[in-house]
Image (cartoon, rainbow, N blue to C red):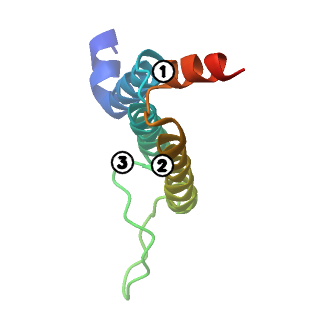
Amino acid sequence: MTFLEVVFDNYFYLGSITIFLIGFHTLLTHSNLIKKVIGMNIMETAIFLFIVSIGYIRDRHPPIVVEGEPHMMINPLPSALVLTGIVVGVSLTAFALSLIVKLYKYYGTVDIDEIMEIRSRES
């Protein structure tokens, strides 16, 4: 099996790593707090894609029991973990955005560099 065949067979891993790096780059390079939260959500989505990709097995069926002949099923645990992660991620995003609203009301900006400059002038 050549390198390209391995890459094309596992394209979802490469895609999730690429999406994660885009979110990580957004988180590190932008000083706007809302953009940082968006970058964090992009990274979170990439991790969810990666976990679901690990749980997928080719030529298997979803874990739904139907009448008739039994068939091989995929593992439902990664999907359950992703659903739990989505709930935690949404609540974390809501909390972060509520903190950003409070910071905006107090400092008048959502730029972290400007907030740090205002804080250094206050002390």
Residue at the spot of label 1: 114
Residue at the spot of label 3: 58
Dot 1 falls on a residue whose secondary structure is: helix
Of badges 1 and 3, the one in the foreground is: 1
Residue 120 figure quarter: top right
Q: Is residue 102 above or below residue 17?
A: below
Of badges 3 and 2, the one in the foreground is: 2
Residue 27 or residue 3, whichever sits in front: 27
Q: Position of residue 74 (x, y in %)?
A: 46, 59
Mark 2 → mark 1, Cα distance in angstroms:
15 Å
Say left or right for 110 vs 12.
right
Instruction: Count up the numbered dots.
Output: 3
Q: Is residue 87 above or below residue 4?
A: below
**Residue drawn at 49 percent across, 46 percent down:** 105
Residue 41 or residue 123, whichever sits in front: 123
**Residue 60 shows which numbered tag?**
none
Q: Which amino acid type is shown beneath numbered disc 1?
A: Glu
**Residue 101 shows which numbered tag?**
2
Dot 3 falls on a residue whose secondary structure is: loop
Q: Which amino acid type is shown beneath numbered disc 2?
A: Val
Q: Are marks 3 and 2 in contact (CB under 8 Å)?
A: no
